[in-house]
Image: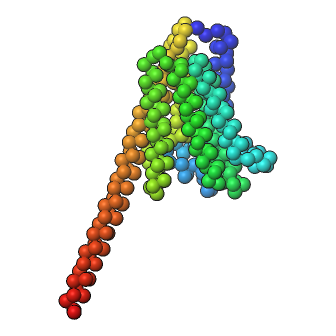
Amino acid sequence: MYSRLEFWLSIGPMVALPLIAAVTLMFFSILVAFRGYPKNSKAARVDTWFVTRLLIEYWYWLVSPIEKLAVRWNVSPDTITWVGLFFALASAPAFATGHMGLGGWLIIIGGSFDIIDGLVARAVGRTTTEGAFLDSTLDRLADLATFGGLAVYYRNTWVMALVMVALAATYMVSYTRARGESLNVECKVGGMQRGERIFFIGITSALSPMVSLFVETGVSHPVHYLTVGGIGVIAIFGSVTAVIRGVAIYRELRFRELKKTSNVVDFQSSKLHGQGGAKTLK
């Protein structure tokens, strides 16, 4: 049962923040209509199945003042990465205790800092391998915190299994790409990359309490169907992406192995023919 305080804590941000987002998105859309997308657009390099370029450009535009401020104040990109992790970790207890709205907004804020650290690193020329490693490692910890909190909340329901599938798919999407790159095979195909996962779990969870207030009135442990929907999308399309990447990388490695074997056979064959020709000349 929601108390009056919980009601306003849920409704307040969900009314104010989406309203601000809608107004700023409309303003940005007008700018794009008259000026077009920015030159050297960062969003143009983002490969995604589910999020439109307009939304990606809008989010980069929205966080650009924070990026410029961080550059001006000489804030380390690694520091920004840790700040993003802090918000992601904070979402775990929020989700675990059923405060889906708060957890969703924390995920969105943490994901925004995950964008800003890369922007700042490129702006000040501090893109380093150790920074990339730290960012990827903390991203996995952030994913674990998010789904860990959700697993605690849904521990006695069927949704727990869905959360586990989503978590496994999340890790496999990242692992297949990382393992492929370690074998010199670059593979970025598929959807449900980190940005898309943040988008789905963040938005659905942030809006979920409002839906639950109307469809689960008086329920002591709401299912939060909108959040479950976001988890389901990640579980399904994350699994599809993991399979697509796994198959693509395996085929590429298999092709290289067959090509390598074929080259060895051709070399040995030509060597034998060369030796035979030498004996004939003698």
Judged left or right of residue 70, residue 177 is left
Figure check: 2 above or below 260: above
Q: Where is residue 278? Give x, y as percent.
A: 24, 88
Q: Is the residue 122 above or below the residue 67 in the image?
A: below
Q: Position of residue 24 (x, y in %)?
A: 66, 37
Name the residue: 64% across, 14% down: 7
Q: Position of residue 277 (x, y in %)?
A: 22, 86
Which corner quadrant holds the N terminus?
Answer: top right
* Residue 30 location (% of width, % of height): 63, 43
55 or 2: nearer the viewer: 2
In the rendered image, the vertical position of residue 197 relative to residue 248, given as above or below: above
Asked whether, in this view, residue 144 is left or right of residue 66, the answer is: left
Q: Quadrant of the C terminus?
A: bottom left
Whether residue 191 is visible to the viewer of this picture, yes or no, is: no
Residue at screen point 28% across, 73% down? 268
Residue visible at 42% across and 41% down in the picture? 242
Give the side of residue 197 with respect to residue 106, left or right: left
Left or right: 271, with 11 as reference point: left
